[in-house]
Image (cartoon, rainbow, N blue to C red):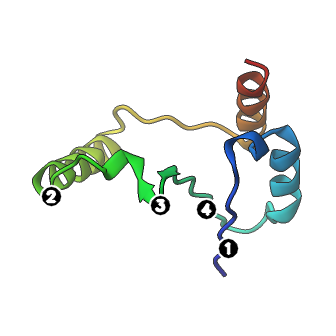
Amino acid sequence: METIIKLKPAEFNIDFMKYLKKYVDSSDATEIVIELKRNGKTSVLEKETRTQMKRRIERAIENTESGKNLIAFTGEEFELLAKKLSNK
C-alpha cells in the first residue's frame, strides 16, 4: 500500500505526527518518506545535473555500506525533534 499525504508547512506539526503514529502499525515494516517540493518541483534536485545526482547516490551508498554519515532515531526521538522544531 502506498499513501501520499500533501501538507502545507503550517500543517506539519505535532498533531499531524500523532495522527501519523496512530495510522502506522508499529509491527509493520513501514517506510515513511518525506519529500519537499516547491512549485511542483523537488527542491533538492532542481539544480542538480545527472552526473551530480549519480555521484550523490554513489556517495550515499558508500556511506551506508561503511556506516558513515548516518542518522538514525526512534519514533519517540523523531516526535521530540518535531515538537522542538515546531516551537521555534
Residue 22, how many percent across, how many down? Answer: 89, 58
Which residue corresponds to mark 1?
Answer: 3
The residues bearing labels 1 and 4 have C-alpha atoms spaced at a distance of 11 Å
Q: Which residue sits at x=41%, y=55%? A: 42
Whether label 4 touches label 2, CB < 8 Å: no
Q: Which residue sits at x=74%, y=44%? A: 12
User: Of residues 56 and 63, which is closer to you in this image?
Assistant: 56
- Mark 1 surroundings within 10 Å by alpha-carbon count, few (fewer than 14), some (14 through 19), many (20 or more): few
Which residue corresponds to mark 2?
Answer: 50
> What's under tag 3, amino acid-wise?
Gly
| Furthest-left residue in this view | 51
> What's under tag 2, amino acid-wise?
Arg
Q: Is residue 3 left or right of residue 47?
A: right
Please tell me whether mark 2 sits on a helix, a strand or a loop: helix
- Mark 4 surroundings within 10 Å by alpha-carbon count, few (fewer than 14), some (14 through 19), many (20 or more): few
> What's under tag 1, amino acid-wise?
Thr
The residues bearing labels 1 and 2 have C-alpha atoms spaced at a distance of 28 Å
* Quarter of the rendering occupied by the C terminus: top right
Which residue corresponds to mark 4?
Answer: 31
* Residue 84, quarter of picture: top right
- Mark 3 surroundings within 10 Å by alpha-carbon count, few (fewer than 14), some (14 through 19), many (20 or more): few
| Furthest-front residue in this view | 39
Of badges 1 and 4, the one in the foreground is: 1
User: Of residues 34 and 21, which is closer to you in this image?
Assistant: 34
Of badges 2 and 3, the one in the foreground is: 3
The residues bearing labels 3 and 4 have C-alpha atoms spaced at a distance of 23 Å
**Above or below 83: residue 16:** below
Of badges 1 and 3, the one in the foreground is: 3
